[in-house]
Image (cartoon, rainbow, N blue to C red):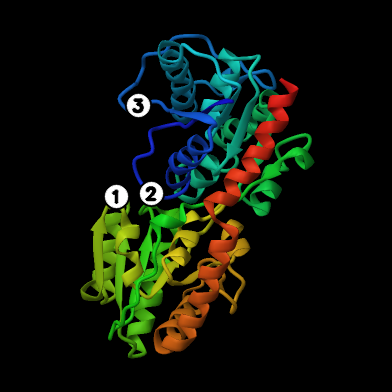
Amino acid sequence: MRILQALFFPPEQPGGVSSMVPFMLDRFNKRGWETELFSLPKRVRGKGAEEVRFVTFDWKAYAGNPVVDKYIQTIKDYIWWTKMRIKSSYDIIHAHHPIACLVMKRLFPDTPVLMTVHSSYERELMLNGKIDKNGPEYAFLTSIYRELEEQADQLITVSNSFKQYLSEFVQEPERIGVIPNGFDEKRFRPVHHENQVPQLITVCRLVPAKGLDTLLYACAELKRKGHPFVLHLIGDGPIRPELEALAQEIGIYDDTIFYGYMLHPEDFMPFFDVFVLPSRAEAFGSVFAEAALCGLAVVGTDVGGIAEQIEHGVNGLLVPVDDVQALAVALEKMTSDPMYRYQLARVALDKALNTYSMSRVVRQLRSVYRTYRKES
């Protein structure tokens, strides 16, 4: 069986799709399933010129809006690049981005195309203050889900909560499959260590949706109560200057390290103590599973896929979104009681190994692929 894994941009950094698909491809190939990776280079811009039409709605009603126009042009570019690069046929195409799915079904209508919806672009844009829920961008982007339902042979998503989110925009939500992300266990190894001062770490893009302002205020409260810590922020993004200024303003700049972008944070993540990320929304939250596989105790918000990974007080701690005091209390528990955080970390590691292994993802996908291979 020949399978194409179609991404959006190339996998350049860990986290989410990028941390899963290349390793998944390797597992399939080792089992004799010929699997290839395809994506659109970031340098390809403004090359495509073919007309774009959708079956379920008229996108031209939203034309003239920069977000919409850029999205449509990217579809054209993906068509141009795919036509130029793909010369062979596949038994199954598995797309990991809406644009990849729509283009692949357009160019290969007789090939089963499966689509995994990994995240919500419109929700990210809203939380980052880029679009409004009542605006044309939101209407356009949410209409894409119905188009995906019409075009793809199978829709899959990464958590039950995100399936519920998608159900508002499709006609048959019961047909959406759920396959949580999986991770190559060999990449993540807990390391025994003893830090005199508790080390907190987060790994994410520095954007408003991640709730990092809440984290900084909670850490300031932790310091006010006399609990020492070092906060390590790995990642880059548009609000980095604001976060650095805020850390300075509330008196924790000397306790915080801004690393910027890092290619393989999992290489030294095991030497820290607590992973914390107070996201305002997450379809899955891959980095929580990655942190658990590194042996860290985890603290997250009670939203989306995070709440499906963490059982409060059993394998981590959950707090409400934007609740500085609750987050400060959770961090105080973690930093002041090494045995407590160790116990939570051990349970989190066991769950991650049993639930989020790459072997489990490969088994589930092989079962799905076989179904469509038989039908084709």
Residue 86 vertical placement versus 143 (above, below): above
In the image as oriented, which residue stretches furthest toward the left? 254
Q: Earlier in the sequence, mark 1 or mark 3?
A: 3
Q: Residue at the location (61% across, 33% down)? A: 115
Q: Earlier in the sequence, mark 1 or mark 2?
A: 2
Residue 330 vertical placement versus 163 (above, below): below
Q: Whole-percent x and y of residue 81?
A: 41, 16
Q: Is residue 10 visible?
A: yes
Kindly identify which residue carries mark 2: 14
Q: Residue at the location (49% across, 13% down)? A: 88
Kindly identify which residue carries mark 3: 41
- Report how far apart the C-alphas of labels 1 and 3 lie in the structure: 18 Å
Q: Given contact means CB atoms under 8 Å apart, are the residues at marks 1 and 2 in contact?
A: yes
Q: Amino acid at mark 3?
A: Pro
State left or right for residue 284 relative to residue 37.
right
- Report how far apart the C-alphas of labels 3 and 2 lie in the structure: 17 Å
Q: Earlier in the sequence, mark 3 or mark 2?
A: 2
Badge 1 crowding class, 10 Å Cα cut-off, few under 14, some 14 to 19, many 20 or more, is: few
Q: Residue 263's mark?
A: 1
Q: Whole-percent x and y of residue 167?
A: 73, 43
Identify the element where label 1 is drawn: loop
Q: Whole-percent x and y of residue 354?
A: 59, 62
Q: Residue 351's mark?
A: none
Identify the element where label 2 is drawn: loop
Badge 2 crowding class, 10 Å Cα cut-off, few under 14, some 14 to 19, many 20 or more, is: some
Indicate the quadrant containing the N terminus: top left, top right, bottom left or bottom right: top right
Q: Whole-percent x and y of residue 77?
A: 42, 18
Identify the element where label 3 is drawn: loop
Q: Nearer the viewer, residue 222 or 5?
A: 5
